[in-house]
């Protein structure tokens, strides 16, 4: 009778140990999954951010030309700004949290820019874009030195 009791007890404790090991395995799997996502995001950003920065620089060159003759090329300016907005929206998820917030703040500020905006308002938005590009370019340089 006592042997059956100790076997039941051993089976119970094996079940407890198995459950604990399963939970520990789940925790470790979650940590590994998180780290794999971070590594993937880092290498995706490292590969795509320079390409997107070059695209934004090309958009900015066109925007600057349109801005010089804004009254004549207002439609061209807004079309190019829409392409720039799309490129920035693509860039944002590839950036760290603080830079992502800066890009989203700029994108939100673009919604106030209408086709009837004055040249001074458009110039302020363009200047803000210049600052954003400088910030992202510095971030790209920092990424080359990290990890």
Image: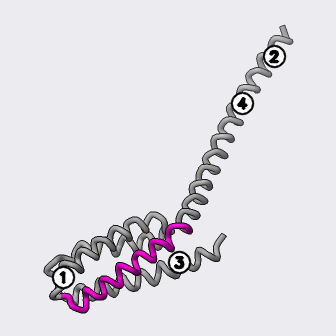
Badge 4 is on which residue? 18
Looking at the image, is mark 2 or mark 4 nearer the viewer? 4
Instruction: Say how the picture is coloured.
Output: one colour
Q: Which mark is residue 131?
A: none
Left or right of residue 19: residue 107: left
Q: Is residue 61 above or below residue 81?
A: below
Say which quarter of the image contains residue 25. Answer: top right
- Please tell me which of labels 4 and 1 falls first in the chain: 4
**Residue projecting furthest to the right:** 3
Q: Secondary structure at mark 3?
A: helix
The C terminus lies in quadrant: bottom right
Q: Residue at x 77, y 16 (%)?
A: 8
Looking at the image, is mark 4 or mark 1 nearer the viewer? 1
Q: Secondary structure at mark 2?
A: helix
Q: Position of residue 122 (x, y in %)?
A: 24, 85
Q: Residue at x 41, y 81 (%)?
A: 57
Q: Secondary structure at mark 4?
A: helix
Badge 1 is on which residue? 74
Q: CA distance from mark 1 to mark 3?
A: 32 Å
Q: CA distance from mark 4 to mark 1?
A: 69 Å
Q: Are marks 3 and 2 in contact (CB under 8 Å)?
A: no
Say which quarter of the image contains residue 40. Answer: bottom right
Looking at the image, is mark 1 or mark 2 nearer the viewer? 1
Badge 2 is on which residue? 7
Q: Residue at x 65, y 38 (%)?
A: 23
Magenta highlight range: 46-70
Badge 3 is on which residue? 139
């Amino acid at each position: 009778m006592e042997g059956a009791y100790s076997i039941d007890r051993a089976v119970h404790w094996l079940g407890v140990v198995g459950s604990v090991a399963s939970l520990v395995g789940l925790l470790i799997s979650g940590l590994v999954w998180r780290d794999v996502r971070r590594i993937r995001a880092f290498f995706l950003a490292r590969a795509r951010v320079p390409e997107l920065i070059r695209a934004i620089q090309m958009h900015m060159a066109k925007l600057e030309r349109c801005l010089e003759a804004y009254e004549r090329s207002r439609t061209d300016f807004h079309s190019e700004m829409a392409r720039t907005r799309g490129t920035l929206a693509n860039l944002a998820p590839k950036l760290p949290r603080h830079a992502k917030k800066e890009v989203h703040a700029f994108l939100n500020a673009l919604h106030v820019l209408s086709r009837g905006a004055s040249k001074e308002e458009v110039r302020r938005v363009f200047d803000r874009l210049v600052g954003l590009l400088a910030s992202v370019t510095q971030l790209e340089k920092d990424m080359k030195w990290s990890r």
